[in-house]
Amino acid sequence: MGVSLSRQTLLIDADDTLWENNIYFERAIARFISFLNHHEFTPEQVRGVLNDVERECIVTHGYGLHSFAHALVHTFERLSSEPVTAALQAQVRSFANAIENHEIEFLPEVPKTLAYLHQRHRLILVTKGALAEQMGKVERSGVREYFESTEVVAEKNAAVYARIVAQFGLERQSTWMVGNSPKSDINPALAAGLHAVFVPHGDTWILEHEELNAAPPNQNLLIVGAFAELSEHF
């Protein structure tokens, strides 16, 4: 049985919910660690330093490839045993630049599921990151037609979800946030009084990891195995 037969509003995340994203960053990080070839730090320790630097860069540069490239360069500068030349910096940045404009790799049955949901419910795409990057992916994906609006935000927290509710005149009791990140998609949406659908992804970015909160009274948290399962509930 579905969650509701009435018309709902689905706020839907993009990266690692509709299409692959983090796997490209993981491949870039693997190339970076191999290139650094640190003789004292293990790959895991290098990754730990990079995670810390990424958190710092997010504060300064936000999300996206620009911030990621800065994080790689800063990490290289911290850990390199040799002087970091302009040529080395360019090489390190190239690991991030290689991600740009990659082909959209949908998760299973996403376009088909969006087409189905679009006929029955109100869909709004809510993604965080750099505006040009995120809009570029949305355009390349060819699924923009299914969404009433695409909202690219600097961060996803309860205040942002509350703003979206007000902006679109949504009713909380019929609004759901759908995504793969407990930290950005599920927990803050629940805190804002919305329902949520958790779609786990095996390669969710480590900085998005967080314990999944329980749904407050009169709110629902649905956990599905894949995005395509939404058609069974909505």
Image (spheres, helix red, strand yellow):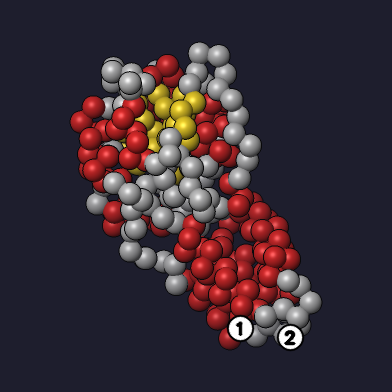
Kindly indicate the quadrant of the structure image that contains residue 210: top right
Q: Which residue is mark 2?
A: 82
Q: Nearer the viewer, residue 207 or 30?
A: 30
| Left/right of residue 56 with respect to residue 158 in the rendered view | right
| Left/right of residue 151 with respect to residue 213 in the rendered view | left
Q: Are marks 1 and 2 in contact (CB under 8 Å)?
A: yes
Residue at 74% over, 86% down: 82
Residue with the most extreme right position = 40
Q: Where 103 sits versus 164, above or below?
A: below
Q: Where 113 sits versus 48, above or below?
A: above
Q: Nearer the viewer, residue 106 or 81?
A: 106
Residue at 33% over, 49% down: 108
| Left/right of residue 155 with respect to residue 40 in the rendered view | left
Q: Which mark is residue 88?
A: 1
Element class at badge 2: loop
Kindly indicate the quadrant of the structure image that contains residue 147: top left
Task: Identify the image quadrant of the N terminus.
Answer: top left
Mark 1 is on which residue type?
Leu
Could you tell which of marks 1 and 2 lies nearer the N-terminus?
A: 2
Residue at 63% over, 37% down: 211
Q: Horizontal and vertical percent for residue 219?
A: 50, 18
Task: Identify the image quadrant of the C terminus.
Answer: top left
